[in-house]
Image (spheres, coloured by chain):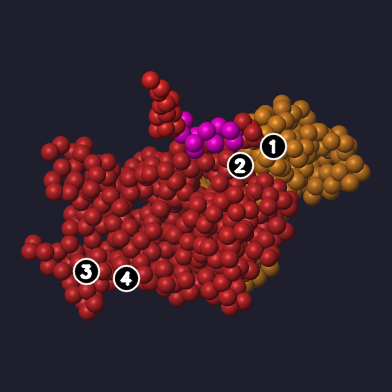
Amino acid sequence: MERLTFDLAAQPLRELNTFLHTGAKEGKVGHVTVLNPDGAHNIAVGLDCPIEVEVVGHAGYYAGGMNKAATVTITGSAGTGVAENMMSGKVHVKGFASNGAGASAHGGLLVIEGDAGLRCGISLKGGNIVVGGSVGSFSAFMAQAGRMVICGDAGDALGDSLYEAVLYVKGEVKSLGADAQYEEMSAEDIAAVASLLDQAGLDHDPKAFKRIASKRSLYHWNADANQEY
Amino acid sequence: METKPVQFKNLSREESYGFDRKTLDYIRNAAAHGLYEIRGMGAKRKLPNFDDLVFLGASMSRYPLEGYREKCLTKTVLGTRFAKKPIELDIPITIAGMSFGALSANVKEALGLAATEMGTSTTTGDGGMTQEERRSSKTLIYQCLPSRYGFNPDDLRKADAIEVVIGQGAKPGGGGMLLGQKVNPRVAKMRTLPEGVDQRSACRHPDWTGPDDLAIKIQELREITDWEKPIYVKVGATRTFNDVKLAVHSGADVVVVDGMQGGTAATQTCFIEHVGIPTLAAVRQAVNALEDLDMKGKVQLIVSGGIRTGADVAKALAMGADAVAIGQGVLVALGCNGETYFQNGAHHDAIADYNALGTTPGFCHHCHTGKCPVGITTQDAMLEQRLSPAMGAKHLKNYLKTLNMELTTIARACGKQNVHHLEPEDLVALTIEAAAMAGVPLAGTNWIPGRGF
């Protein structure tokens, strides 16, 4: 497989994304290196084939957005909405990620080695997210399906209005959101956390994580829920 | 002398203006349930609307066109600012975004069939794109909503244009709702929700928060679709002058402004009736914003919210809209609030089913229950068969055709060879309120309230 390099200091982003949407699908190029991203927005968005993309440096908003099948690695940090609405494949951030990381991801794996900002995994719809560090407030807000593994701490209102997504946290949780509760870790939970940590290349004891899931008390309109909605 | 007791019937039974029978019912309902009322459709209260405007037909000072002989163009092009493939429509009347979930799959298919025959567009809704509507719609607008239910890049690439929904006229500032009765297995799967939950959609997008972020989000959607598809931004009408300017700043090709008469499948009544501004006021503000930015004609404007007739369409266009979008009118054309439904070659009485909902044809707003007596706003396997795609499409096509004929009739009478040549100078207002909101003179005067004499 051939390797190709795009230098965003010299080539426009449009050229990179066009290649990734068209030329990459021919299957001759297996790996694309993106140099000098310099925080550009929308790098490697809407990929639709199993290509590897390595962004050497920091990415702006929506890096790897709506990814399908591809593997996107960012050696630096990522801006807002990294891997938003991902369908499959993998997005791996070596540094930190800003707000809304993995928002509404339907599938695939998002790995953030450092910390993630506010609302990590918001509206998650089946994707998996592993965060090596901590996550900000309102993470996993209204998360519907999928799993989040948080190796550090979580901010306020973790898992507010959760549906069927499941969260695992190793560190401290500042507070749980409405309708989220701690639950027993089963053998399946421990195996799931071990598998996700393994895929993320992070070394933690899976037994040290707490499980958080929905109480399901807000699934139906209920006058006695006292404005919890 | 014997005197009879005197009874003053009208005094002793005087209804209170503030605490009228409707308000008493509202308070009793609140006391009984401890929850606000949720219902479908749009604002029911009396509002200044397009009926408060009339056209100044041609006479001595203007020259009319021959009503049935001379050409009057209705072609409408949307999304000319950045998109490589703008939307070209035969008529300026489009079908507003309504979800599969709120509507049955049959209805979505009917909308596509009729729109395709009439050369106009349909729009998805909060719940993703169904194969039925993609197949049946030549031109399909794909909504990107805060909930992102069913949102995926494959459907994005299949769409002809993308509509980023910030808000809706029935509930600007609020997310959607879909009550459990309508979250059947297919709807639940498309939205990744447990079956039967009372679904509450998010009111904010998960991955951006303000107009500067939206500019980047729109660029992402363009990059993913290789700058081919027009991007619409839809706002519920509130601070419309500023919101339209910010939508343009964010890079919209088309701005959709939905006034407070716009419908919904399920929202709190207090929201429907008390949040947002009338469509009439919103059109003027939106057009002013585009003119202020010198973007009139570069960024197109679609107006929705209570558009019913060809005259409404003509008035919206005259005020400066490029097209309109219709939701509730479309549903009524399909049979909403009708006394009968048509199935297996015959009309069947639906009144008992309305009565079971506590209502009667003409007043029904029970879309939220999923028990639509005429099979439109339902996910029930039996009820949805009351509306066949072919029959629905036939009625909708007739309705759209009628609106378009009315539109061209008015345009010709005003001497226009193209409906897009209708202009504010063709309009006057019948009430001071409408004159002030629409920014056209009160009939018989040259007074526009707020602009001096």
Q: Which residue is mark 3?
A: B412
Measured from the top left, where is residue B37 in percent x and y? 57, 40
* Label 2 close to label 3 by CB (< 8 Å): no
Q: Position of residue A162 (x, y in %)?
A: 71, 40
Q: Are marks 1 and 4 on the same chain?
A: no
Find numbered disc 4 in the image and state the secondary structure of the residue it sits on: helix
Q: Main secondary structure of the magenta part?
A: helix
Residue A29 on the magenta segment: no
Q: Are marks 2 and 4 on the same chain?
A: no
Q: Chain of mark 1?
A: A
Q: CA distance from mark 1 to mark 2?
A: 30 Å
Figure colour of chain B:
red
On whether residue B21 falls in the magenta region, the answer is yes
Q: Residues within 10 Å of mark 4 (few under 14, many from 20)?
A: some
- Checking the image for residue A222, the label placed there is 1
* Residue type (three-letter) at the residue carrying disc 2: Gly
The amino acid on which the numbered mark 1 sits, given as a three-letter code, is Asn
**Where, by quadrant of the figure, is residue B231 drawn?**
bottom left
User: How far is mark 2 from mark 3, CA to CA?
Assistant: 53 Å
Question: What span is colored magenta in the figure?
Answer: B16-30
- Using residue B241 as the reference point, say whether residue A32 is left or right of it: right
